[in-house]
Image (cartoon, grey):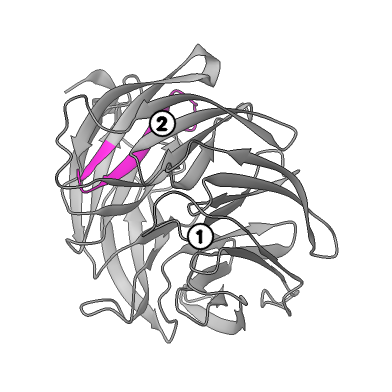
Amino acid sequence: MTEGAARADRPEHGHRAEVPVYLGTYTSWAGGGAGIGLGVYDGATGRLRATGVVEGVPNPSFVIVEGRRLYAVNEQSDGGVTALEIGADGVPKVINTRSTGGADPCHLALHRGFVLSANYSSGSVSVHPVRPDGGLGERTDLVVHEGAGPDPARQEGPHAHQVLPDPAGEFVLAVDLGTDSVYSYRLGDDGKLTPVATARLHAGAGPRHLAFHPSGKFAYIANELDSTIVVAAYDDGVLTPGQKVSTLPAGTPTTPPNYPAEILVSPDGRHVYLSNRGHDSVAVFAVERGGAELRLVEATPVGGKFPRHITLDRSGRFLLAANQNSNNITTFAVDRATGKLRQVGDFASPIPVCVALKG
């Protein structure tokens, strides 16, 4: 055991031992959950335990929590986003649901008093204002991307897969798998998105998600269709693609096929983590040249199948992986000196596709 891994097993001064956790799933799939899963995360050990479920929220495949408010996409053909308030008993209760105006929303973000949703199948981004009670008002904007890519099965049209604000909160970025592009916008006080710039990636990349370096000067774009990460310089809403690295170790067989999903940056900016679906691993990268380059350290077996979502706890001491096709969430202690991972927990959950930690 390395010194860094040993430290990860010990509580730190001021570290909250237990925090609520909210789990996304698919309610319409056989073997899926009944709604948003509820649980408790132990920050001292990295382990989870279940406490219940919020029923009546269809296909909450991506969930975010902010204070006493919870927001979930409803990933279905008539896409929606649901707002919930966390009661004094710790149980979220639905406030309301609004249509996103698109199909299969799969990601959302809270920014400047608005909830923005990425509609995958219709390749669009919707905007809803947040009411004083935490509920959602009528949609203020719906921006539809245009274009296609060379993969006829996955890039026949636009497929918005992520929407997020930049670290400074000045711009909103939308990652589109179908058009091999990342779009930058300004969000006005009226809830309207104004285009700023478009970053084009290499053809057939299939960008899915991106994550920023803490400096705000670089972003790391995970490409689902060709198992690469592109490092992009970032300045004033503009991404400039640079280094391209594989998410897999050299010599990895092409069967089964691999589809990268979530990408994270450690709080100290020294490491990047990416979930490999198919290879069933978490790729660990060292960040070099101040954020301008990545170097693959290892690809750690994830302890499950098809890791859809990964997240770090607030301290960066533990990483959690939601393994969609094996119905489990695995936890890893992080050696913060090397970035390497060591599995310390395994929690059963029906088709887990998102893990949101409170606080």
**Residues rendered magenta in the picture:** 266-282
Relative to 258, does residue 135 appear above or below in the rendering? Answer: below
Q: Is residue 15 left or right of residue 139?
A: left
Relative to 254, does residue 42 appear above or below in the rendering? Answer: below
Question: Residue 81's x, y, as percent?
Answer: 56, 75
Q: Of discs 2 and 1, which sits in the foreground?
A: 1
Which residue position is annotated with label 2? 272
Instruction: Estimate how packed mark 1 is, as few (under 14), some (14 to 19) or many (20 or more) residues with alpha carbons within 10 Å.
Output: many
Q: Is residue 275 magenta?
A: yes
Question: Residue 239's x, y, as percent?
Answer: 64, 33
Which residue position is annotated with label 1? 159
* 231 or 205, nearer to the observer: 205
Q: State if disc 1 and disc 2 touch (CB < 8 Å).
A: no
Q: Amino acid at mark 2?
A: Val
Question: Residue 119's x, y, as percent?
Answer: 54, 67
**Tag on residue 265?**
none
Q: Residue at x 45, y 78 (%)?
A: 76
Q: Residue at x 77, y 72 (%)?
A: 140
